[in-house]
Image (cartoon, rainbow, N blue to C red):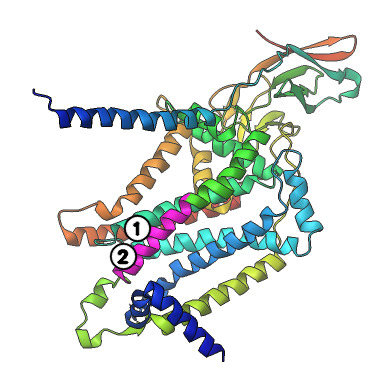
């Protein structure tokens, strides 16, 4: 195939044009992606004194930037799970009447082992470890 | 005196810019007059409400401060301290809802009168894009007061984007300005709401109105079949324009009534460490999709339920956009099937919306 001057210049112009477009849009697209900010690694948090925490109740604890739901069951067992619903990211709550973890957004429920039992949640909640050290509740990351 | 100044001003402009096309439009443009003429006013009222949004939005901008620590406080300041701030905010909120309502009515009236057919395909496409952009306005504006309901609605709405294959996660991070819904999300939504969407909307609105002016009002089939002497028309100016203005005035009164007697609640400030409140629901125009997601099981075959849901609505929306180009072998068949499709779509939206409100 013979490449005459006009074709060659058109090709050059075409590549230049594509390069120009990429050089405009690449920085714009990169600008849209937020830079990753360093997150302090949190392995455990204190969640208050056990005597101040009534049975059959719950509270949301800040675990670094993540919400964790701490539950004291009727038989005084402590359970902690990620409070973020595995369906669409809402924050779950403990229902004292049904003894289940419930997400108000799409009516998803989990049992007290964190297993998704009804509604749309596709996965169980992440489990955290709870220890009582000198009457203080300590939640730790499992694994 | 005023008339003299007015005509002098017009002739001054005329000498320089030749106003013949505008004069012709006002003099010769006519609107068909038939039993379905009322639907011609639905587009105009949507435009009117958009203008209300523009004006009240600019006013709110004077006091609104985006940011995790300032957004909620600034809206509270607007509604409690600024003179008539409560009115401007209520009108903005109510008008957005009425705008989307009339945009839906306008779209379905165009659908059922088959006004999208050749040569008006592009009017349909630009119109549908304007509706989607209006929903984008609604979604982005909902977060701006940074209250509890808006916070969770945004969490759910942006998380849905994340289920899209391949690009979903990146798109979610871009929308949220990070992994979670935070102040960064608020800044982005503010930018989208007051700069990006208005810019895109204006372009599509310009073309939508241009196409309508170029092609004139659609005449439905039963009107086209009438003999020429039986076809009734009214002049666009002043007859149709005055009727339009009257309808704008009626809707404006309804809008003010709603703003006065059913003020928009501000609710509690968003807190990322508080459970989603019971009875949480999105704006009514997203309710049918929200309700559908509620019914989907966690998994459908190997796919996650919400992925199937979002793909279903995405594909349906795309087909709806391309409706003017869907051709059937027999015209009669198309004329019979299309209204049934429309009724099914309207019924689905209405029933799911009602069920959504009843179940919450």
| Number of numbered discs | 2
Q: Is residue B241 left or right of residue A118?
A: left
B337 to B229, vertically: above or below: above
- Using a 10 Å C-alpha cutoff, classify the residue at mark 1 as few (fewer than 14 neighbours), some (14 to 19) or many (20 or more): many
Where residue B127 sits: x, y (%)? 40, 57
Determine which residue is flagged by label 2: B115
Residue furthest bottom in the image: B1
Instruction: Give the residue displayed 76% in from the left and 56% down from the top.
Output: B78
B83 to A27, vertically: above or below: below
| Camera-nearest residue between B27 and B230 | B27
Q: Is residue B278 left or right of residue A135?
A: left
Question: Dot 1: what SS?
Answer: helix
Q: Chain of mark 2?
A: B
Instruction: Give the residue displayed 59% in from the left and 52% down from the top.
Output: B357
The residues bearing labels 2 and 1 have C-alpha atoms spaced at a distance of 8 Å
Q: Main secondary structure of the magenta part?
A: helix
Quadrant placement of the N terminus of chain B: bottom right
Tell me which numbered mark, 2 or 1, is placed earlier along the sequence.
2
Determine the image quadrant of residue A72: top right
- Using a 10 Å C-alpha cutoff, classify the residue at mark 2 as few (fewer than 14 neighbours), some (14 to 19) or many (20 or more): many
Where residue B77 sits: x, y (%)? 79, 53
Where residue B315 sits: x, y (%)? 36, 41
| Camera-nearest residue between B16 and B87 | B16
| Camera-nearest residue between A102 and B11 | B11
Q: Is residue B178 left or right of residue B15?
A: right
Residue B195 among those drawn in magenta: no
Q: Which segment is the magenta one? A: B200-216
Determine which residue is flagged by label 1: B124
Q: Check whether the beta carbons of the residues at disc 2 and disc 1 lie within 8 A of each other.
A: yes
Instruction: Give the residue displayed 41% in from the left and 24% down from the top.
Output: B302
Where residue A19 sits: x, y (%)? 35, 28
């Amino acid at each position: 195939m013979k490449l005459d001057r006009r074709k060659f210049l058109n090709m050059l112009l075409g590549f230049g044009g594509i390069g120009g477009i990429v050089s405009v849009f690449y920085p714009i697209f990169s600008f849209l992606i937020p830079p990753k900010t360093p997150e302090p690694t949190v392995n455990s948090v204190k969640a208050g004194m056990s005597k101040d925490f009534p049975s059959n109740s719950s509270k949301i604890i800040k675990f670094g930037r993540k919400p964790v739901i701490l539950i004291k069951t009727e038989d005084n067992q402590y359970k902690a799970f990620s409070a973020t619903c595995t369906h669409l990211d809402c924050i779950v709550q403990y229902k004292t009447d049904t003894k289940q973890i419930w997400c108000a957004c799409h009516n998803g429920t989990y049992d007290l082992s964190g297993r998704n039992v009804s509604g749309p949640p596709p996965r169980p909640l992440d489990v955290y470890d709870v220890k009582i050290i000198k009457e203080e509740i300590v939640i730790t990351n499992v694994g | 005196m005023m008339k003299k100044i007015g005509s002098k001003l017009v002739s001054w402009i005329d000498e320089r810019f030749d106003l013949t096309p505008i004069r012709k439009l006002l003099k010769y443009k006519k609107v068909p007059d038939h039993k379905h003429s009322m639907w011609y006013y639905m587009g105009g009222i949507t435009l009117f409400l958009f203008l209300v949004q523009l004006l009240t939005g600019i006013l709110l901008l004077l006091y609104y401060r985006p940011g995790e620590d300032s957004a909620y406080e600034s809206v509270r300041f607007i509604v409690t301290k600024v003179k008539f701030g409560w009115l401007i905010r209520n009108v903005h909120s109510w008008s957005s809802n009425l705008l989307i309502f009339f945009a839906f009515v306008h779209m379905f009236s165009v659908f059922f009168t088959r006004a999208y057919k050749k040569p008006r395909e592009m009017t349909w496409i630009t119109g549908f894009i304007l509706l989607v952009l209006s929903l984008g306005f609604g979604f982005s504006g909902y977060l701006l007061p940074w209250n509890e309901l808006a916070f969770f609605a945004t969490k759910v709405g942006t998380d849905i984007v994340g289920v899209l294959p391949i690009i979903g996660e990146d798109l979610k991070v871009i929308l949220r300005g990070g992994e979670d819904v935070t102040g960064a999300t608020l800044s982005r939504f503010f930018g989208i709401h007051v700069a990006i969407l208005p810019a895109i909307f204006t372009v599509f609105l310009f073309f939508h109105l241009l196409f309508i002016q170029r092609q004139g009002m659609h005449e439905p089939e039963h009107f086209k079949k009438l003999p020429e002497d039986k076809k009734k028309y009214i002049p666009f100016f002043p007859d149709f324009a005055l009727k339009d203005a009257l309808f704008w005035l009626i809707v404006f009164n309804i809008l003010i009534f709603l703003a006065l007697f059913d003020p928009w609640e501000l609710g509690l400030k968003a807190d990322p460490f508080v459970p989603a409140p019971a009875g949480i629901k999105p704006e009514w125009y997203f309710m049918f999709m929200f309700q559908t997601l509620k019914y989907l099981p966690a998994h459908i075959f190997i796919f996650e339920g919400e992925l199937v849901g979002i793909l279903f609505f995405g594909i349906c929306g795309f087909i709806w956009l391309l409706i003017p180009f869907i051709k059937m072998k027999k015209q009669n068949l198309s004329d019979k099937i299309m209204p049934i499709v429309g009724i099914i779509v309207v019924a689905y939206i209405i029933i799911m919306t009602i069920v959504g409100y009843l179940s919450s």
